[in-house]
Image (cartoon, helix red, strand yellow):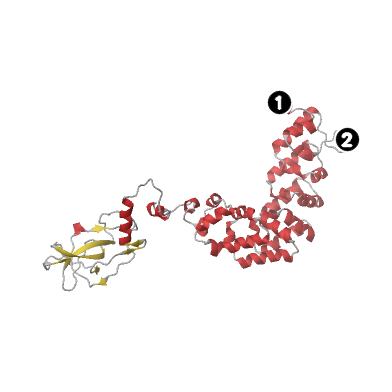
Amino acid sequence: MNHMMGAVFALAKPSVKHFPALYRQTSTAVVIVQQEKHVANAIPKGDHAVCCYKNVRCYSLRSNSYTKPHQRKRHMLMHLRALTCPAPGDALDEKGDQVSVEVVEDVLPVRLEEGDWTDEMQWIRSQENNSVLLPPKDVSDIDVLAPELRPTFNLAAYVNKSATLQQLVKLGVDLSTWDARKDVNSFILPLDFERDMKKYIVFLHDLGISADDLGRWLTVNPYIFQQNIEDLEARTNYLEFMKFSEEDIARIISKNPYWLLFSTVRIDRRLGIFQQSFELTDHEVRYLATKQPRLITYSHSSIKMTTFSVVEEMGFEKSEVKSLLLAKPKIWMANRDALVRRFDFAHNHMGLSHQQIVQFPHVLLTRDFRIRQRHGFLKLLGRDQYDPSKPNYVSPLALVSGTDAEFCLTLAKSSVQAFNDFLKTM
């Protein structure tokens, strides 16, 4: 039961004096007193009401436990009694302090936020005879017995009480991912699913995001609920104006949920940079944006550094760089140092030419240990032959693809046990 009183229907009385004496009590009144140090006593017109400090219970504004009288303002709930005789006039407080007192005559029932006082007492009496082992008649009774939720950074604590979070969980949203982002919970919790979220979900579904994929999409990009729906429509209309098909738009939005957070001006600028830097045609720009939508919104500085490494450090020509970009755009999203290291091994140790790497760009995206282990085993067997014009040719794509068992059977012509024994020597 909430210990804070929402309101008190009271008749305001003028400031009254303090009386330390306590007399025989005959009738009851309730007052709320806000005071600094002493307990105030109320004297209605025609009657005298006196309160003793020791008989007053101080209720803290923060908890329902009794608190010690501190030197600060606090509200007190006091039961005062009308007296049969007046208090002596010389029993004033030494400092003569006066406070404002609100007196309620005839003690009206106090209404709390959770219901009428009488109803609450009746509910408490009815629960005394119920066994705790029996299931509750009403599920809402559990909420009354459970403690109030404290501030938390975990959305799971609110799922049972939030219809919005329950709907999101049904869609397949991973709330634990949102918990890892400190700025998501603050704007998600106040939202109403029907009023604030449903229109965005309908919008995404109309774009081509399947119902099974909505949970993953919203898990990645909950910031969509902070965007203006008109702005989102304008950004998709821009793609239609740039002659992207409906299938292309659906793939772009599905593969890169953050695309819709970029304005049409920023997207147009990004597409223009790729077109000018790599000398792409309009069709090639649309192909690149559809094949790897994340690259368009990727860090521009990282793309420039990777381009510098491919051209200057690896020595590819502009036409070869363009072919690499269209064949494997993910190269521009990989770690630059790892790319240089893999190119060095493939070109200088395996003997692959630039044309072969352009033809088989998967070599630049394969983990170092795999290509080193398999090439070393082929070299041990004398089968490291990557020139297509010579016998026993080994395709670089086959070298980095498949399982170890497939590699041993088709390329090395050896057993898996022999390959594992070789790995122990590395």
- Rendered view: 315 above or below 237: above
Task: Please report the residue visible at 19 percent of the width from the left and 59 percent of the height from the top.
Answer: 53
Amino acid type at circle 1 is: Asp
Tell me residue 34's x, y (percent): 27, 64
Quadrant, the C terminus: top right
Quadrant, the N terminus: bottom left
Q: Which residue is mark 2?
A: 390
> Is residue 94 at all visible to an observer of this figure?
no
Query: Which quarter of the figure has residue 96?
Result: bottom left
**Which comes before the other along the chain, label 1 or label 2?**
2
Foreground of the two, 119 or 368: 119
Query: Which quarter of the figure has residue 205?
Result: bottom right
- Secondary element under disc 2, as helix, strand or loop, is loop
Foreground of the two, 323 or 39: 39
Left or right: 209 with respect to 36? right
Q: Which residue is mark 1?
A: 421
Query: Within 10 angstroms of label 2, few (less than 14), some, or many (20 or more) residues?
Result: few
Q: Which mark is residue 242?
A: none
Left or right: 183 with respect to 151? right
- Secondary element under disc 1, as helix, strand or loop, is helix
Query: Within 10 angstroms of label 1, few (less than 14), some, or many (20 or more) residues?
Result: few
Tell me residue 155's x, y (percent): 50, 52
Amino acid type at circle 2 is: Lys
Tell me residue 259's x, y (percent): 66, 58
Q: How many marks?
A: 2
Task: Please report the residue visible at 35 percent of the width from the left and 62 percent of the height from the top.
Answer: 115
- Rendered view: 351 above or below 256: above
